[in-house]
Each structure stands twice: as structure tokens, then as C-alpha cells.
Image (cartoon, rainbow, N blue to C red):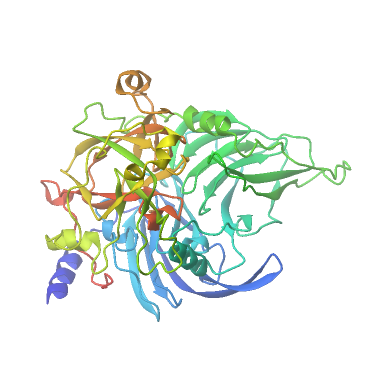
Amino acid sequence: MFWLAYALVFLGCLGLPPADAAVVEHTFSVGNLTIDRLGQRQVITAVNGQFPGPMLEARDGDAVVVHVVNYSPYNITIHWHGVLQRLSGWADGPSMVSQCPIRPGGATYTYRFNVTGQEGTLWWHAHVSFLRATVYGALLIRPEPDRPHYPFPAPYGEATLLLGEWWNASVVDIERQAMLTGGPPNNSVALTINGMPSGYELAVRHGETYLLRLVNAALSYQLFFKVAGHVFTVVAADACYTDPYNTDVIVLAPGQTVDALMHANASPGRYCMAAQVYQSVANATYTTTTTGLLRYEHGAEAAGMSTIMMPSMPEFKDSATAQDFYGSLTGLLRDGKPTVPLHVDTRMLVTYGLGIAPCMPTQTLCNRTRGSVAASMNNVSFQLPKAMSLLEARMRGNADGVYTRDFPDRPPVMFDFTNGSMSSNRSVMLTSKGTRVKRLRFNTTVEVVLQNTAILGSENHPLHLHGFNFYVLAQGAGNFNARTAVRSYNLVNPQQRNTVAVPAGGWAVIRFTADNPGVWVMHCHLDAHLPFGLAMAFEVDDGPTPDTVLPPPPPDYPQC
Ligand code: C2O
């Protein structure tokens, strides 16, 4: 009865898309795919037998409908990374936050949402366990049909490059092993470009300009990307236009995207492109690189230029280059588009990083003296609920037993956050577990200082917020100091993103307006850090008018 009532209300409020908007409809059949990589045959989880999965292409204003059918042996959800999901939080996808997973054995769920007021490169990925290692694809949003122009000269061609990671093993086993030991998961064995550890080729015409749509779909690594002999003009990041920024290296943290123009104006020939790990952890030694080929269509052979030039890559710990890139982007101001809010209603200081927690009984391989690696925000190690998603509990108006509304606005103790010697202070290292959310009234403007800690080592963590783009006002090294930092705030044209790579042992200040009712998780996009608890959630109240109220869930909303 309960669901029937909701089903009827839902059908009643299905708005029709504007006349020129299209419906982009797909079926995603999730299942096993046998695939050969690096000389090994293995079975992965994939969509429609494709790896990477199908590309979704829409125009600003379109409605997207994706019927997901789960024939895989695992629970599945799909997240549309960076889609704002205005009033469509039911389609957001993080398991146990916006929905219960779609069960194996052919269960289905249809994701319905509009892409409105967004243009550029986004992507979709599984949002349950480590499955996004192979369940991911691009989601491109082009300008509206009646306004077919980018705010930059139209490129001659474009190419989408999904950068990922590859394991010679089942990622579900990798995750299980990490859970049992309470330690980090095994490293991948290769980086990939469009699913290939090597062999990707892009053919270009001399003299033309190409729009490269880059996505960092890796689970654990930030990346430097270069093409030998070529420079780029960055024009967007996370599907938010930027002022044109010229660079010969692009830096992307997991979750982030960059749209960059590349001018094919080198002498015709063959040039290597390379993606290489950027490692921000002080003692880390692991690095890897993958290469692809940029090939000029005419002239290469004729000119006898068979040399494949390798780009000179930054040193793998080159934080200066990474920070230079991240800190140089500014947002493109456009007529009629919102700008950074100048009034702030709610201020938060959120420390985050690694920590420890007592081993759980299920962690049979966990070192009892050391404890399990945990991660936290304001010392709360985020636990996903088991019986009902956060969003469903919000809708039922009863959070009891699912979550509490006491996520702290400040860390429980103030200490020298970025001082490495704190790592040995057990009282600072110990995290508390909880499913604690920060409640926000509709339309509140929130400013959050994100402060990395040095507990168990500082690291550049890519923090991703669902349901919103935020402005990045400033970032810096060491402990945040309001007095000095405020002077560096960009309140004119700050970049907008959905994922900010906060400097290792440093801080960033973000600002957003909570104008999208629902429950929205903010978490580290290094995939191992989410089960460790590096997350929190915002619960945003409904607004005062019918069009600012989250509609009820669709009739096929999965049940736990
Ligand atoms: Cu791309 Cu919550 O994730």
C-alpha cells in the first residue's frame, strides 16, 4: 500500500521535458565478461559486455533514462559522477546512501534524471565495493541544440580518454583481502587508457584542434598526463568551464575530469601520450606509467618520421607541478550563470585523513595490537547503514537506527593537524564510528575548510561531493589559519568542481549552496578510503515551494 501510494504520486508528478529536450535512453546489462589483458584471461564485471562501458551522450536539458539489469554475481548500483541530480536524489547511486543495491539474478532499477545547466565531461561508475574498477564509462554533456557553441573555438574533433587501473585478479577478492587484514588493498598492476594497458591510438590531422575529454577513473592514483611535443589549453574541469589555461601537463585525481584543447601542430609523426602516477605520500615508492600513441594521419610515413617521442614526465612525487595545476584553474564567468555566493550561513572545519580503529571480529587477519586502518572526517569514521538507505530513512521521516544528525562542525580536539609526530599519539589516531550527517536547511550557503591530518601520513585526498558543484576558494599547505587564508580567497572567479584534490598536509576551502534537497555523501575518491570511513553526508531539507521538495521515490526503487 505504502509503495502503491508513492507510485501513484510519482506518476502524477512526472514532468514532461521541454519541447526541444530529448530522452536519452539506455539499458545497462551488468554481467560477467571474460577478457584478456596482460597475457591473462579473467572474468570481470562489465556493462553490456563492454570494457570500459558504453558512453552516454546527452545535451544540456536532456532527460536520461538508464534501465540497469543486474546479471552479475554482486550487488550493483550506478552513480552518475558529477550529475547534480536536482530533485532526483533517488537516481544518484551510492549504495546505502541513496538506495539499496540492485540484487544479483536479474533485478532491475531504472535511473531517471535530467542533465540541466551542465556541460562537459562527466562519467558513471559502480558505487558499491570496488566494482567501479571495471564498471565505468564516460557521460558527455554537450551544449543545448539551439546554442551549439562552446565558449571556445569549436574543435575539429574530440577524443574521450578514460584513465583506469588494472588488476590481474578479481577486485572483489582484492577488497575482501584488504577488509580481512584491515590494511590497504594490493596495488594494481597497470594503468589503462580506455581499458588498455597499452596500444591505445589517437589519429589526428595536422593543423586541427581536438578536444580531449580526460577522466581519472583509477581507484587509487592521481595521474599526470602528457603528450610528447604538444601543449593543451584546459577549458573545463568536472564539467565546469574554466578560463583557458595553457599547460603541457594535465593533473587529475580519481573522480576528476578535464576538458582540454590540443592543437595538432607538431611536425607530422608519431608521439607518445603517457599517464603516470602522481604520488603524494611521503614514503611511497610505487609508480607506474601507461602509454598510448598520437599519430598524424598523413605525412608520418611519407616524411619518414617513425620516431615515437616519449614526453618527459614530471617526477612521480612532483607535488609542486600537481599543485601548480590544481591551483591555477579559475572559473569562466558567463552571462546569466551563477557566481560564488558571498554570504555564508554555515561554517565548518572538517579534518580528515587516516586513523585506526580496533579490529572487528570479522577482520580475521587484522593485527590486534596495531588495529585496523580506518579513516575519518572530524574523527567520525563513516559507517554505511545496513537495513535502509539514508535517503529512504529521510523520506520516511524517521532516522532512528539509520543515522544521527550530529556530525560535528569542528574536530573534537584541536591539535597540530599536519605535524607528523602526532602519528604516534594513539588518542589522536583512534577514530569513532558512526553514521552521522550534517543537516542543512534548504538554500543554506555552506563554507567548509577541509583540513588534511598527518596521522599515518598525509596524502592528497580527492574529496568528492555528491549533488552539488562547489567553488574552491583557496588551498594551501600546513594548518589552515583563517586570518591569513581569507586574504587568498578567490571571490571573483573561483573554479567550480565536484572533486577537490586537497594538498597533502594542507587544506582547501569550498563553498556551495544547499539548494538540492536530499542526502548527499562527501567522500574521498581513493576507493579504499570509502570503506575505511573517509566520508560524511549532508542532509538537505526540502524547500518551501512544491518545486523545491524532493519527490517520492520511483516505484521500482530497490528494497534491502
Ligand atoms: Cu565518483 Cu561517490 O563517487
Q: Position of residue 157 (x, y in %)?
A: 61, 45
Residue 307 figure quarter: top right
Q: Is residue 354 left or right of residue 12?
A: right
Q: Quick check: 151 above or below 461?
A: above
Q: Residue at x 26, y 69 (%)?
A: 557
Residue 103 figure quarter: bottom left
Q: Residue at x 65, y 33 (%)?
A: 231
Q: Is residue 101 left or right of residue 188?
A: left
Q: Position of residue 153 (x, y in %)?
A: 55, 34
Tally the marks. 0
Q: Position of residue 451 (x, y in %)?
A: 36, 35
Q: Residue at x 20, y 63 (%)?
A: 392
Residue 209 figure quarter: top right
Quarter that holds the N terminus? bottom left
User: Which of 37 and 547 lies nearest the eye of the viewer?
Assistant: 37
Q: Position of residue 433 (x, y in %)?
A: 28, 55
Asked whether residue 17 appears in the rendered view, the answer is: yes
Quarter that holds the C terminus? bottom left
